[in-house]
Amino acid sequence: MATTDEPRMLKHQVVRSQLDKMLDELSEGDPFPAERELADTFAVARETVRQALRELLLAGRIERRGRATVVAGPKIVHQLSIGSYTEAARESGRDASRILIAWSHFHADDTLADHLEIETGDPIIQLERVLTVDGVRVGLERTRLPERRYPGLVENFDTPSSLYAAIRDYGIDFARTVDTIDTTLPDAREASLLHVDARTSMFLLNRVSYDQNDIPIEHRRSLYRGDRMTFTTTMHA
């Protein structure tokens, strides 16, 4: 029986190919046809179109704005490093800022105390902010710090600016980090804060940073939009 090395394209992949060509003729911010309209245009089921659109969302070619779908700009490429994301984005010529959600105070449980190498029950300050790049909400960060190590931080810190720079003002240098990266979906609160659909794929980064004396600085949980962000890293032998 004759065989071929060419894989058979699934129906949604054929539609995806046609949509890619359509996107090549459009500009960032242009409205994109609705699911029903595309199903009629290509004479396919709406589920087929839905699969193709899901792939385009993950690829960052389109994005949801409320109930509308528009052509997306290029994904933001971020070099995974020890430094501040805000500082790195600004150095690359982007308009990066942070929106304060809240400061909060609580006491470390066993897990957080273990991460930060402090005693259970020690006071913690938590800073939660939305990261924006070129006016688009792309990330949500929650940073937890041992309160007694950063006196006056809550009162004096300019929340849209770099937290890493503020920490360095305390004479603390970032020497290394331990990062864990997973994929996840946002909960209802996170989706609302990031102005995205709850089905938007996310990168979840958990980080513990250490200073020049190998003492933990922070425990940070960062949620980044998978449709707007790409991460790279450089490794040396």
Image (cartoon, rainbow, N blue to C red):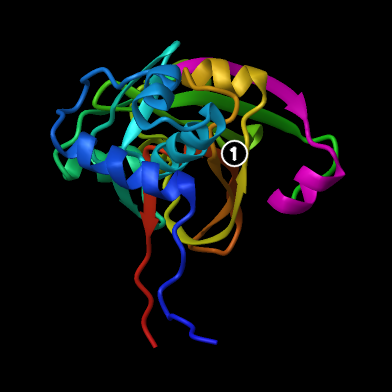
- Vertical arrangement, residue 92 with respect to residue 82, above or below: above
In front: 148, or 23?
23
Position of residue 7 measured from the top left corner of the image (x, y, whole percent): 45, 70
Q: How crowded is mark 1: few (under 14 residues within 10 Å), some or many (20 or more)?
A: few
In front: 16, or 192?
16
In front: 126, or 223?
223
Is residue 112 one of those drawn in magenta?
yes
Q: Mark 1 points at which residue?
A: 149
Residue at screen point 21% across, 20% down? 30
Is residue 86 one of those drawn in magenta?
no
Seen in the image, is 152 located left or right of residue 91? Answer: right
Position of residue 226 measured from the top left corner of the image (x, y, whole percent): 46, 41
Q: Quadrant of the N terminus?
A: bottom right
Position of residue 36 measured from the top left corner of the image (x, y, whole percent): 45, 18
Q: Residue furthest top?
A: 67
Asked which secondary structure carries label 1, the reply is helix
- Vertical arrangement, residue 82 with respect to residue 130, above or below: below
**Residues in magenta?**
100-116
Residue at screen point 21% across, 42% down? 21
